[in-house]
Amino acid sequence: MANIKSAKKRVLQTAKRQLRNQARRSSVKTAVKKVVIAMESSNVETTKSLLVAAESRIARAKGKGLMHRNTAARKIGRLAKKVAAAARTA
């Protein structure tokens, strides 16, 4: 543990931020997983609504600085592409 007061504060802030980021990252992964599972069950309406929710989670994570804007755009684009392909086959 640090000796200087500002360093101690920094350690505590980093730990708090780490937990918050971990939770956000986990919620993004969970939202994406739900979309993939819904695609496999071939329920188009549910999949589309879950896609909207996943896009929202990814955009929020991008806004909070959790991921780069291009990474977020790529994830949303690839997911939307998969959902569109699944909707066409269903």
Image: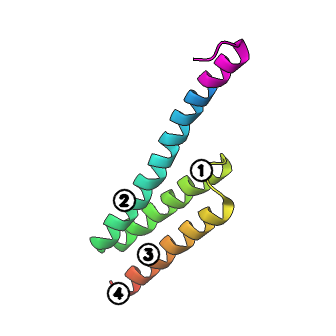
Task: Please state which of the two labelled residues, at mark 2 or mark 4, is closer to the viewer.
Answer: 2
Identify the mark nearer the N-term, 3 or 4.
3
Identify the mark nearer the N-term, 1 or 3.
1
Identify the mark nearer the N-term, 2 or 4.
2
Q: Quadrant of residue 12?
A: top right
Secondary structure state at the residue bearing disc 1 = helix
State the separation of the CA atoms marked 1 and 2: 17 Å
State the separation of the CA atoms marked 2 and 4: 19 Å
Type of the residue with mark 3: Val
Q: What's the magenta region?
A: 1-12
Q: Position of residue 41 (x, y in %)?
A: 27, 70
- Pick the front one: 89 or 20: 20
In reply to whether residue 3 is colored magenta, the answer given is yes
Identify the mark nearer the N-term, 1 or 2.
2
| Residue where numbered disc 4 is placed | 89
Q: Position of residue 22 (x, y in %)?
A: 49, 41
Identify the mark nearer the N-term, 2 or 3.
2
Secondary structure state at the residue bearing disc 4 = helix
Q: Residue at x 45, y 47 (%)?
A: 26
| Residue where numbered disc 3 is placed | 83
Identify the mark nearer the N-term, 1 or 4.
1
| Residue where numbered disc 1 is placed | 61
State the separation of the CA atoms marked 1 and 3: 21 Å
For residue 44, side relative to residue 15 (left or right): left
Residue located farthest toward the bottom when viewing the structure as drawn: 89
Secondary structure state at the residue bearing disc 3 = helix
- Pick the front one: 86 or 75: 75
Quick one: quadrant of the N terminus? top right
Image marks 1 and 2: residues in contact by CB distance under 8 Å: no
| Residue where numbered disc 2 is placed | 34
